[in-house]
Amino acid sequence: MTRPLSARRARAVVEAARLVKAPHWADTRAWHVVADGEVLVVVEPSYGIGQRHRWTWRLPTGGASRQTETTREKSAVAGLAAWQRRATRKD
């Protein structure tokens, strides 16, 4: 088990994160939120009925969102907030 990050360190990672096209973007249209070479969040289009042009996010470790956002940037922000909560959690 890894040690939780301090709130300050987690915030620094979040501030350094960038939204980039995933290597397999042409097939999946997925984007990655990356910091220090590590994928923190995966942002993907949501193809649900009546949800045209919506985006959802998931953590690479498995935690997926059930809510959708109107832009991939908003979805990335929501995913980063979840990543930050998980990274600073002291189980």
Image (spheres, helix red, strand yellow):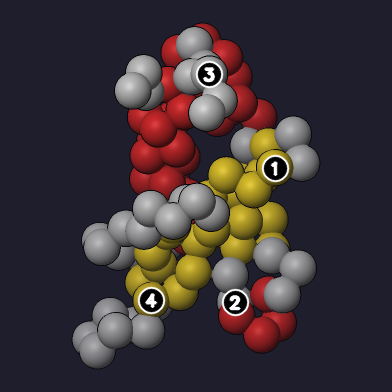
Residue that carries the numbered disc 1 in the rendered image: 38
Residue lying farthest bottom? 49
- The answer to whether 60 appears left or right of 70 in the picture is right
Q: Which mark is residue 79?
A: none
- Comparing marks 1 and 2, which lies closer to the viewer? 1
Up/down of 7 relative to 91, above or below = above
Earlier residue among tags 1 and 4: 1
The answer to whether marks 2 and 3 mark residues whose Cβ atoms lie closer than 8 Å is: no
Q: How far apart are labels 1 and 2 at the CA level?
A: 19 Å
Which of pointers 2 and 4 lies earlier in the amino acid sequence? 2
Q: Nearer the viewer, mark 3 or mark 1?
A: 3
N-terminal label among 1 and 2: 2
Q: Which mark is residue 29?
A: 2
The 10 Å Cα crowd at callout 3, few under 14, some 14 to 19, many 20 or more, is few
Crowd rating for badge 2 (residues with CA inside 10 Å; few <14, some 14–19, many 20+): few
> Residue placed at 40% from the left, 32% from the top?
86
The amino acid at mark 3 is: Arg
Q: Which residue is mark 4?
A: 46
What's under tag 1, amino acid-wise? Answer: Glu
As measured in the structure, the alpha-carbon distance from the residue carrying label 4 to the one carrying label 3 is 33 Å
